[in-house]
Amino acid sequence: MPVRTQQSKIDSLRPFRLVKFFSFTGLGLVLITTLVLSWVISNYAKKVMLERSESYSLLLAEHVNRQVFLQFVLPTVLRYGEIALRNPTQFKRLDTVVRNTTEGLNVDSVTIFDSEENIISYSTKAEEVGVRDEGGKEYERALNGFNTSRLMSSASLLNLLPGSDPISSKLLTYIPFRRENPLSERTDDIMGVTKVVQDLSDDIEAILRLQLSIIVISILIMGTLFFILMQIVTKADQINEARAQERRRLEDKLNQAERLASLGEMVASVSHEIKNPLGIVHSTAEILNKRLQEQAPGSKHLAEIIITETSRLDDIVREFLDFARPQVPQYSKVLINDLLVKVEEFMQPELSKNKITVENHLAADLLPMDIDQNLFYRAFLNLFINAVQAMPDGGVITVSTFLAAKEKKKVVIKIEDTGIGIGEEKLTMIFTPFYTDKNRGTGLGLAIAKNIIEQHNGTITVESEAGKGSAFIITLSQH
């Protein structure tokens, strides 16, 4: 049975584990997909931005070349016969043309290389004028008539962190500076190379911030979903565990009921077989006692011993039968307080004999309850007998009745004693049939009381401490 129970528990949990696995895996896949998508989107945005910036830069460079040729080269050649940028007047004229042409446009710098040697003849940055060998492969390609662009960038998400290096991204565009004919048509005569530098740092930063925003929002959404899913999973685990515990409890209860049913059948059969011969022995002993009184008065105590012991055995057999074949409750309106007083009156000789007093704290506002008077009389009697047996040297039994504090429709009956108490290791066993730590007794008194109370949809619990006494607490519902 335990193996089957464990297997059924595993089988019941398996589908839920699959649900958890697929849920968390799905969240992980969605998060990874979102991160990849954010990377793809940002890269695509960067690519589109670079393509547009490059096209813009080419057009801008072409425009600068045309304006320089029309507004500087032609007038200078006509006036001076040659171009000599070492002449401050010519340099200033060229600088004015370039700056007027690029004013208000997104241009970081404009540089013009000489066509005969890799030297900077002009730059909007004065410190670069005269610098040699700065053109590189792009300069060579432009001299061969090809437009070339190169991106110089040091930008990543890490640059957005506080204290990191600032984002730097510049697009360098090299185009040949061609001579134009009188019809304003470009020729194949290359006079130099023009380099236009655009600062794209702000655009790249905007794209990175977009990428970071997508990642952060995705993480927040996934985190929120993960938290909600965790709450659902935790709650489901708790419900599943509670159901598993309830199932185990019901299985244990069913197993116990099956064992008790088998035991009850055996006890009922044996008790029935014992009861009839025992009745015959008792009747014979009574007849024998009468005859001994007349013929052998000195031996009549022997017959009295037989009568006493058979009466005790008859009580034990009756107790067995009460446990094995519990009676069907016959409900009627009964005042609990009156029933308790009747039990106390019946037990009074035994209480006096054992130097035990009773203190009553009975609530006056209790209404009559639908219970079986005879069965509850038996249950209370068993509890009183148990209390008397727990106080061999005398003591006090305190009987209390009251309405439950939280649920006014619940009636609580509390029977306390000042006896030897019950050890912690025995508390879980006291309602088990046939369990007893006394020299005499069947161990059925408390089990029968518990059965009677549960038949009436009530509960019975015990609070005890070794050496300080015990308290049996019964809770019933008022209807």
Image (cartoon, helix red, strand yellow):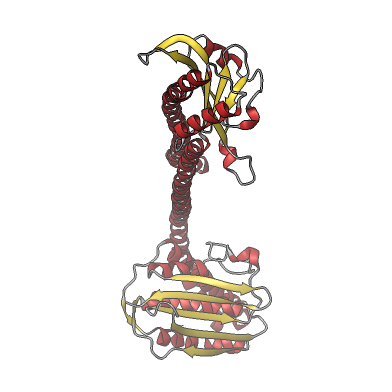
Q: Front-most of 469 and 42?
A: 42
The quarter of the image holding the C terminus is: bottom left
Say which of 287 and 94 sits in front. Answer: 94
Position in image of residue 321 (x %, y %): 44, 64
Residue at (48, 35) in percent of width and height: 35
Question: Is 155 placed left or right of 184 in the picture?
Answer: right
Whole-percent x, y for residue 203 in the image: 48, 37
Q: In this view, does 53 lie above or below 182?
A: below
User: Where residue 62 appears, x then y in whole percent?
Assistant: 43, 22
Instruction: In the rendered view, tell whether residue 280 sits above or below residue 244.
Output: below
User: In the picture, residue 104 is in which quadrant?
Assistant: top left
Question: Which residue is pictured at 62% across the width and 31% down the height?
Answer: 126
Q: How many labels does the image show?
A: 0
User: Which quadrant would residue 299 be assigned to in this image?
Assistant: bottom right
Residue farthest to the front, as pictured = 79
Q: Where is residue 136 in the image (x, y as percent from the top left)?
A: 61, 16
Which residue is painted at 66% across and 76% down in the image?
A: 420
In the picture shown, does residue 9 fall above or below 450?
A: above
Say whether residue 235 is visible: yes
In the shown orientation, is residue 363 left or right of residue 436? left
Q: Which of 116 and 441 is in front in this view?
A: 116
Left or right, 75 with respect to 184, comes to right
Instruction: Determine if residue 247 is in view.
Output: no
Q: Nearer the viewer, residue 214 or 479?
A: 214
